[in-house]
Amino acid sequence: MLENLKQKVYEANMLLPKYDLVTFTWGNVSEIDRESGLFVIKPSGVDYDQLQPADMVVVNLDGEVVEGEMNPSSDTPTHAYLYRTFSEIGGVVHTHSPWAVSFAQAGVDIEAFGTTHADTFYGTVPVADALTQPEVEGAYELNTGVVIEREFAKRSLNPMDVPAVLVRQHGPFTWGKDAMDAVHNAKVLEVVAEMNYHTLMLTHGDSSIPQYLLDKHYYRKHGANAYYGQDNALSHNHSTAIN
Amino acid sequence: MLENLKQKVYEANMLLPKYDLVTFTWGNVSEIDRESGLFVIKPSGVDYDQLQPADMVVVNLDGEVVEGEMNPSSDTPTHAYLYRTFSEIGGVVHTHSPWAVSFAQAGVDIEAFGTTHADTFYGTVPVADALTQPEVEGAYELNTGVVIEREFAKRSLNPMDVPAVLVRQHGPFTWGKDAMDAVHNAKVLEVVAEMNYHTLMLTHGDSSIPQYLLDKHYYRKHGANAYYGQDNALSHNHSTAIN
Amino acid sequence: MLENLKQKVYEANMLLPKYDLVTFTWGNVSEIDRESGLFVIKPSGVDYDQLQPADMVVVNLDGEVVEGEMNPSSDTPTHAYLYRTFSEIGGVVHTHSPWAVSFAQAGVDIEAFGTTHADTFYGTVPVADALTQPEVEGAYELNTGVVIEREFAKRSLNPMDVPAVLVRQHGPFTWGKDAMDAVHNAKVLEVVAEMNYHTLMLTHGDSSIPQYLLDKHYYRKHGANAYYGQDNALSHNHSTAIN
Amino acid sequence: MLENLKQKVYEANMLLPKYDLVTFTWGNVSEIDRESGLFVIKPSGVDYDQLQPADMVVVNLDGEVVEGEMNPSSDTPTHAYLYRTFSEIGGVVHTHSPWAVSFAQAGVDIEAFGTTHADTFYGTVPVADALTQPEVEGAYELNTGVVIEREFAKRSLNPMDVPAVLVRQHGPFTWGKDAMDAVHNAKVLEVVAEMNYHTLMLTHGDSSIPQYLLDKHYYRKHGANAYYGQDNALSHNHSTAIN
């Protein structure tokens, strides 16, 4: 069942250690097959060294296991919620990458300070409000999706323009058109967080770029007038992410 | 004698350079066989490149060598004291990992700022009071164990809930159900220290998480109601550490 | 056409990931053949893992493709402008290396704080003024070259003495006698930026070195009286860069 | 001539990239044969990838080449001066390792903040006063040795107790009983500098350890009562460095 997708999700998961985004088993990637309404996700707590494509778990949009012998990631209800809420996304990633976590713990948004940011994220990557005590003690992982949705609604953000969020006191979730794209965004977020940190330490002030530079760089890589890359065919150009 | 344990302790020691936790020979791992009351520890000052399982030294709870041709780690009396004092622990690790050492040198506790911390440590990882001059000039390594015990007593901490300490002006000791678990905790401590440092620089304030989030994440991985991982059988899930 | 140069430019591009200067495809290197007035540059958005010498694109000084099946780097007009403006340079590099980008985002010049800097850069590496809205919305990549030229004119800098600039809100461009030299300068800039950052955090003040130390170290490696290295023949000594 | 020593010095030089202490060719190691009064040093500006044992240059205590087809390191007069001045040392290392350089550029001493420091350096690693204009414009590399000697005299430091210095606006020199020991000290200095930086950022105050802890740790590894390691025979224990 969904063998190709399992292979894809396996490969996307294996990029997390390659890109230095995980310690131990602290990350997970999923991708959805929108036709069947099923998604494939990493099993919970399995070492990357031992992970196999066949270990991937098939789950439905209620977060129930449809196929697979292992428990899915404990964050599965968050993935399911994001797939239900953000209908255009095809892949979701969660990590504890250290720079992004530091901003999540500090409650500091990752603002667009430069073109590195603008090439991928169309504006500020928000920190979502902390979960309340009832939200933590209730359906915690599902409520993690709820606070993300709430933050995007409150700020009127399009999740395809800003495919990342920092869950307060926790860490980053990113998404994209598919699993690979979501992993790409997870890496960009970590790099951008590192650059923002050092920029903030140098200035202790606001270094936000103007809207016209944000527009320029974002639309250089995204949308109908994108001109970066090779037609999105031969290269790993991510400019098709929101086409 | 205890050949299987020597192999285990050797492998746990070799994880220290793999996890970037040691420079030169600045780390050591031991594990105890509670039935015989003997523990196995790395020899003192031997390069990881040259270390062999047969080099491991068997020591009793008074810190006396029972078998082995090499001197045991100079920190052996600290390990012995911790095994005598904390009856539930099965493995001990000491390193000079740079982020944890920085907090130990600064005398700043590693507080729970996020879920990465809460998944492993049930609250603040304390800095123990500095050893006094008589404690340093006396049985120094044994007294290092004494100040750890004193700090845990003073703060009413359960060593299985908070399996780590920073010895002031020195560095981290961690422990766990066995050597591998103690090494796992040493790595988590280093990662959490790095995240805490950057969080502190971003906020210059207190970013402690609420008790209910600490409870949620800690008990997601530990105790009877843990639901992270694969039954603790197929994976390197550490949720059995204190069962 | 220019097969040797394609090979050279390919090899120089492959040094960017080797020297930890790029994430994904965020960098490009070119080198010019001054006789023909053509330069060779990396194609846009192609992964370094998949890059081949034959993928290199031949471009004229107006930035028009002369040979090659792929789109050239989207930064090609900047390279072309720099070759037209700085007649002595033979190679150009652009990256998003994180330390240099942090200074570009903060708008903080990289001043000469030590001999590591002075060995390669004869004084401050400037941050160029941000592009104006018309400059961003017009011929953006060409205008990136314009602001670099303007900054060097305003500060009366010789581009062969200071072969690097930080484009505000964007990142570093470096150049040199050829592609390899420009890559060398890109790496030095990143290392120097890292050292400057930590120096600034330690002092919160000006740590600029005196002119006589700048002279001593710069001319130890550059010009007629250079005495570092092996006659610039057997080694990768860069002292010939501006001879 | 001195073929064994060339091999030793070659191997010690090759540890610099292995220990992440150099970028490009920015480092050099030498070792002296006290009987003949000759020392062997790396050639100037040669890539580590291409370095061969036969490339090592034999130099006398006046810094004159006695054997070898390549130019010796441009820092040779500093090495020679240190061998003439500090009669007990057998090896010298110079690098531009980034943490140590940051302190040299900032003019901030590396004080003993913990046992990691005390295990190798018996107290503060000093920043030497900057060279004056005549010193820079005169016999610069020799005068670099002069300011080191002056700083040690001014502070009444024994170079075997504190086998390292930061040359202001430049970077670290370390030494030891032989080349390997000097490289060891160069690595310890870099690690200690990194830890001190983060400690300073956390506290913004003095974290110096008391004399009795400095004594305890230093003499645990050095001198007649050292008890760390394996008799200094089987292991890379450096406790014999000043015996």
Image (spheres, coloured by chain):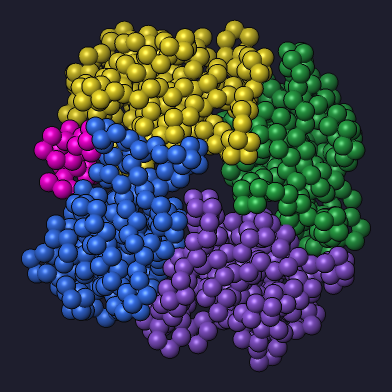
Chain colours: A blue, B purple, C yellow, D green
Left or right: residue B78 versus residue A117 is: right
Residue under the point 67% across and 29% down: D170
Residue under the point 64% across and 15% down: C211
**Is residue B154 visible to us here?**
yes
* Number of numbered discs on residues: 0
Left or right: residue B18 versus residue C16 is: right
| Picture layout, residue D116 above or below residue A135 | above
Residue D148 found in image quarter: top right
Quadrant of the frame with the N terminus of chain D: top right
Measured as percent of width and height from the top left, residue D85 is found at 88, 30
**Is residue C230 visible to us here?**
no
Q: Which residues are magenta?
A: A215-243
Classified by dominant secondary structure, the portion drawn in magenta counts as: loop
User: Residue farthest to the left?
Assistant: A35
Residue under the point 46% across and 85% down: B223
> Nearest the camera: A59 or D154?
D154
* Residue A232 sits inside the magenta stretch: yes
> Nearest the camera: B108 or B203?
B203
> Nearest the camera: B54 or B192?
B192
User: Residue farthest to the bottom?
Assistant: B35
Residue under the point 28% across and 19% down: C143
